[in-house]
């Protein structure tokens, strides 16, 4: 990989400033989206190590003197123990494709990359509020409120590859893969096999623009890829619709099969759909709102 040079510095600085300018808007949008799905943190609803009060219960023979809540016990003839709600910190890693196609956006819509970042950050906020650790795949997972800000900065600054790296996996964690999965996904089966061998489970989320999901084109259309390397001029785009949708359906079925056979889940989100619906599905699939 080519290393940055001195001549690259002004461009890198400009890109960093542009990214930081979007940071407050991304955080605000993600906070609003997360609040629509699950306003508060969700623990495991059982007694154990944690910070939040769960319940008072009568003391039993196994409770030591230090466990007794004497203030509560003074209001009655019995002794009571103050239980806290257990919160087991798990780790979740999020990967967003860095492929050029993720920048595509139809008229007046978010790009697939923008929507992926929004859903990823909102999901991170929900997981962090539940006491879990979160990071981008390959980065150290952390818990706490500050990690949401770090995630927002990383999502805007980090350009991940078009293939998730199995070497970045950590045992027993959970992974959320977000991509359009339209380019050749030959890397995915090996990645999923490696994950399964490490006890890692997760979700593969396909994000599409409505143009890609429905192929509304008719007449003469000049198709170009986002990298500018390929071009196809069609005089009758409508005649391509049936074959295109069949290929897209094949890819969706392949993605569903590859994930299911390794104990993963898959889903599809189109950018003209409500992101809250997809976020709620991801949150539920990860065990949120127990």
Image: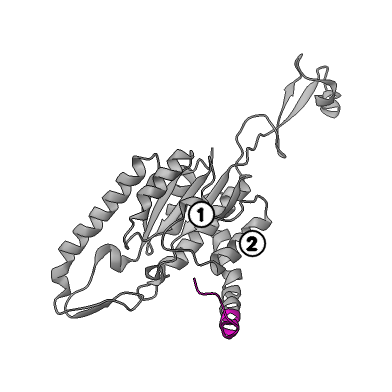
Q: Is residue 274 above or below residue 18?
A: above
Image location (x, y in percent) of residue 66: 84, 25
Left or right of 13 in this view: 192: left
Q: What residue is rendered at 62% in x and 41% in y?
A: 89
Where disc 2 sits, the SS reads helix
Q: Is residue 67 visible to us here?
A: yes
Image location (x, y in percent) of residue 166: 46, 51
Q: Is residue 172 above or below residue 229?
A: above
Q: Nearer the viewer, residue 231 or 279?
A: 231
Q: Which mark is residue 94?
A: 1
How many neighbours does mark 2 have within 10 angstroms: few (below 14), some (14-19), or many (20 or more)? some
How many neighbours does mark 1 have within 10 angstroms: few (below 14), some (14-19), or many (20 or more)? many
Q: What residue is rendered at 60% in x and 35% in y?
A: 44
Image location (x, y in percent) of residue 94: 51, 54
Real-space CA distance between mark 2 and mark 1, rounded to the nearest whole angstrom: 15 Å
Q: Is residue 225 above or below residue 244?
A: below
Q: Which mark is residue 75?
A: none
Q: Nearer the viewer, residue 253 or 262?
A: 262
Disc 2 or disc 1, which is closer to the eye?
Answer: 1
Location of the C terminus by quadrant is top right
User: Which of the 4 image quadrants contains residue 80?
Assistant: top right
Residue projecting furthest to the top: 61
Left or right of 4 in this view: 259: left
Where disc 1 sits, the SS reads strand
Magenta stretch secondary structure, dominant: helix
Q: Reading the chain from its start, which is encountered first: label 2 or label 1?
A: 1
The residue beneath circle 2 is: 149
Image location (x, y in percent) of residue 13: 61, 80
Q: What residue is rendered at 64% in x and 51% in y?
A: 142
> In the image, which residues are magenta?
1-14
Q: Is residue 227 magenta?
A: no
Query: Could you tell me how many numbered marks the image carries?
Result: 2
């Amino acid at each position: 990989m080519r290393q940055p040079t001195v001549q690259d510095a002004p461009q890198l600085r400009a890109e960093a400033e542009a990214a930081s300018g979007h940071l407050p808007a991304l955080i605000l949008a993600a906070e609003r989206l997360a609040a629509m799905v699950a306003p508060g943190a969700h623990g495991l609803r059982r007694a154990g190590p944690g910070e939040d009060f769960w319940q008072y219960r009568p003391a039993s023979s196994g409770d030591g003197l230090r466990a007794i809540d004497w203030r509560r016990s003074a209001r009655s003839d019995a002794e009571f123990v103050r239980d806290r709600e257990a919160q087991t910190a798990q780790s979740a890693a999020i990967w967003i494709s860095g492929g050029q196609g993720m920048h595509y956006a139809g008229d007046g819509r978010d790009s697939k990359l923008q929507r992926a970042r929004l859903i990823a950050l909102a999901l991170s906020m929900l997981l962090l509020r539940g006491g879990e650790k979160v990071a981008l795949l390959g980065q150290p997972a952390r818990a706490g409120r500050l990690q949401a800000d770090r995630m927002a900065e990383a999502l805007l600054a980090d350009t991940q590859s078009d293939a998730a790296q199995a070497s970045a996996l950590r045992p027993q964690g959970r992974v959320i893969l977000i991509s359009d999965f339209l380019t050749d996904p030959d890397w995915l089966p090996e990645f999923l096999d490696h994950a399964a061998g490490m006890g890692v489970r997760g979700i593969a989320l396909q994000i599409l623009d409505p143009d890609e999901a429905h192929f509304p084109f008719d007449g003469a259309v000049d198709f170009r890829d986002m990298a500018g390397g390929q071009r196809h001029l069609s005089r009758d785009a409508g005649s391509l619709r049936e074959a295109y949708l069949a290929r897209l359906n094949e890819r969706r079925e392949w993605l569903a099969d590859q994930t299911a056979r390794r104990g993963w889940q898959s889903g599809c989100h189109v950018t003209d759909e409500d992101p809250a619906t997809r976020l709620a599905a991801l949150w539920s699939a990860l065990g949120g709102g127990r």
